[in-house]
Image: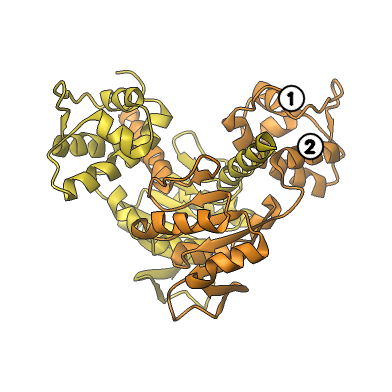
Chain colours: A orange, B yellow
């Protein structure tokens, strides 16, 4: 099987959103063109991306919409919910605990961990906040494989080491630290500054070219 | 001038972070290798990226660290602070209002807008929350050019139209809506689901190849 390019994987959630919207509207079949038009992509790109899932469409009709949803969801491994825990219940951590969209992406955040006495023992957006001292035992007990890291840069590596020790396999890193992990651990870095950089440069470029 | 690839632009904030850390440690000159090692990138990539700024390093010594910081900051347009407003003060919006890192990226969020009577008129993380009815007059008065969109998908297009009408030129879109805007407006889409897709697929791939 050919390896699937990362940009393709990153576009799949967008396709799922379009599929869900059109399903709600009662649509039964969907073409690459429908998806492309909804998202402002080219037909060729959408068709190529979908090709990686192995689904076969009918010429001039397209794909069975339910089947397409199923193959993409399955490709992403989102048909089963993955349990996750979050460490660092500050402003961003709290926001993520309350973000309802994650359930659509097969992610269930079980609880948050922190050291702040004001919040440990309480619930935030319905999720229990536990003390970091209980982290390792909880992760082992619940067999959680995904850790969401929303601590400051200064404690990011220390918490990462703790996550790895407790058996976490995938870390979603919202801190700005470049984490060091063993080879069998996957780190996905979330970088708001990178997006802001693109926005700034695109904006200044537009202004320049217009003058 | 050659157009600078988007991935290069997205890496520049990471380089700035390394530069700032090393400056704090008293370092005066920095090489592409120093940056590459800190971030786990290749020397060639870092050297090529930095090349786009036009700065010239000395062989075997590297770049003057202050000068390198200056050229990257200037390339990103972050030497001057850009004022922004945020619409949609829910969990995510509140988190962004309180995110201190933005100031390093030349972004100053002046205020938040919402319709929720419980928060309008109050301050969140020191930022005043105003009613959306006052949006257009405030943006025109303060000449704000960047709008941060953290509303639900269902109201995203409506708020976008309002932003465009008020004179906003760049929209940082955290909603899952594919926004329709005039040609002279820049939209930067933030897509948490795309990151989560990558994490899921990388994780399942690792598990598969290990079995």
Q: Which residue is mark 2?
A: A71
- For the C terminus of chain A, the image quarter is top left
B28 relative to B120 in the view: left or right:
left
B106 relative to A195 in the view: left or right:
left
Seen in the picture, residue B17 relative to B61 is either above or below; the reply is below
* Residue at the (57%, 31%) spot, across then down: A7
- For the N terminus of chain A, the image quarter is top right
Q: Residues within 10 Å of mark 2 (few under 14, many from 20)?
A: some
Query: Label 1 to label 2, Cα distance in Å?
Result: 11 Å
Q: Residue A115, how many percent across, how many down?
A: 43, 73
* Residue at the (40%, 58%) spot, across then down: A158
Subunit bearing disc 1: A
Q: Which structural element holds mark 2?
A: helix
For the question of whether residue B208 can be seen, the reply is yes
Seen in the picture, residue A47 relative to A180 is either above or below; the reply is above
Q: In the rendered image, which quarter is residue A186 located in?
A: top right
Q: Which residue is mark 1?
A: A51
Q: Are marks 1 and 2 in contact (CB under 8 Å)?
A: no
Q: Earlier in the sequence, mark 1 or mark 2?
A: 1
Q: Residue A176, how many percent across, how many down?
A: 38, 50
């Amino acid at each position: 099987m050919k390896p699937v390019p990362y940009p393709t994987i990153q576009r799949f959630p967008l396709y799922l959103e379009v599929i869900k919207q059109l399903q709600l509207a009662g649509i039964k079949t969907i073409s690459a063109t429908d998806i492309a038009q909804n998202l402002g992509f080219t037909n060729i790109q959408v068709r190529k991306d979908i090709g990686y899932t192995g689904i076969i469409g009918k010429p001039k009709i397209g794909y069975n919409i339910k089947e397409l949803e199923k193959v993409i969801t399955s490709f992403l491994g989102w048909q089963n919910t993955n349990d996750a825990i979050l460490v660092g219940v500050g402003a961003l951590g709290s926001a993520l605990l309350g973000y309802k969209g994650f359930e659509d992406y097969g992610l269930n955040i079980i609880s948050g961990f922190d050291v702040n006495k004001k919040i440990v023992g309480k619930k935030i957006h319905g999720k229990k906040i536990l003390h970091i001292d209980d982290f390792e035992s909880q992760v082992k007990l619940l067999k959680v494989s995904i850790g969401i890291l929303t601590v400051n840069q200064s404690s990011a590596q220390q918490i990462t080491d703790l996550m790895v020790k407790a058996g976490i396999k995938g870390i979603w890193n919202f801190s700005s630290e470049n984490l060091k992990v063993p080879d069998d651990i996957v780190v996905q870095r979330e970088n708001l500054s990178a997006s802001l950089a693109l926005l700034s440069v695109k904006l200044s470029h537009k202004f320049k070219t217009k003058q």
